[in-house]
Image (tube, rainbow, N blue to C red):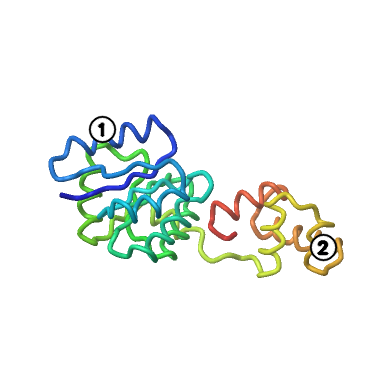
Amino acid sequence: MIRVLLAEDMLMIRSALTALLRLEPDIEVAAEVTRGDEIVPAALRVRPDVAIVDIDLPVVDGITAAADLLGRLPECRILVLTALGRPGQVRRALAAGIEAFLVKDAPGERLADAVRRTAQGLRVLDPELVSAAMAYGESPLTPRETLVLREAARGLAAEEIAAAQHLSAGTVRNYLTSAIAKTGARNKIDAIRVAEDAGWL
């Protein structure tokens, strides 16, 4: 019997996934959680063979929580639920040692197969997903541009970033302008979106 922990905050999706898994005679849903910070405590309690983790979880994102789980309970395999439009997240997950992914709009019958393959320690990689993740390549941003754009993503103004980094506000604006140009974005907000989707922040 494959014991599964399911981490998904959307009730309708979680209920559908649970219902699909319960149709399988060799799979048991041992626990369900709705937040990233609940994953490790629940896993340590029920000792699942596979944790199905949505990336976009509240409090702690799914990749961060999954990486923590791998460190605390390495025998538990991780199957990440993701969307094709977020290749940067796949790159982050791969870097964290996660090797199994299921696209959220995949046919329902692929779920049980993905769980079984993940439990066996096999890679579950959708070719289209990997292709999209690799298409972005390495970040064109310098470490300083990355830092400034990351701080801007947190909502800090140029003056606040400058004070925290011991730079002038003009220098911070120059870094932001350079980051906008390198990402091919229209403005700072667009540059943040592009960099986050590509996994550069």
Q: Which residue is mark 1?
A: 19
Q: Closer to us: mark 2 or mark 1?
A: 1
| Residue nearest the observer in this picture, 180 or 70 | 70
Judged from this view, the residue extending furthest toward the front is: 45
Q: Looking at the picture, tell me which residue is in the foreground, 67 or 139.
A: 67
Q: Residue sitting at 26 percent across and 44 percent down?
A: 30
Residue 18: image location, x then y, percent:
28, 36
Give the residue displayed 13% in from the left and 41% down from the top: 25
Name the quadrant containing residue 14: top left
Q: Earlier in the sequence, mark 2 or mark 1?
A: 1
Residue located at (65% from left, 54% from top): 184
- Relative placement, left or right, of 170 versus 43 is right
Q: Are marks 2 and 1 in contact (CB under 8 Å)?
A: no
Badge 2 density bin: few <14, some 14–19, many ≥20, Cα 10 Å: some
What's the residue at 51%, 63% (across, down)? 137
Horizontal placement of 180 versus 75: left or right? right
Give the residue type at disc 2.
Answer: Ala
Q: CA gap, disc 2 to disc 1?
A: 52 Å
* Element under disc 2: helix
Report the amino acid beneath label 1: Ala
- In which quadrant of the rendered view does residue 172 lie? bottom right
Q: Residues within 10 Å of mark 1 (few under 14, many from 20)?
A: few
Q: Nearer the viewer, residue 197 or 131?
A: 197
Determine which residue is flagged by label 2. Answer: 162
Q: Where is 148 relative to 53, above or below?
A: below
Where disc 1 sits, the SS reads helix
Task: Pinpoint residue 7: horizontal percent, then vertical percent.
Answer: 38, 44
Q: Residue 68 at what x, y percent from top left? A: 43, 61
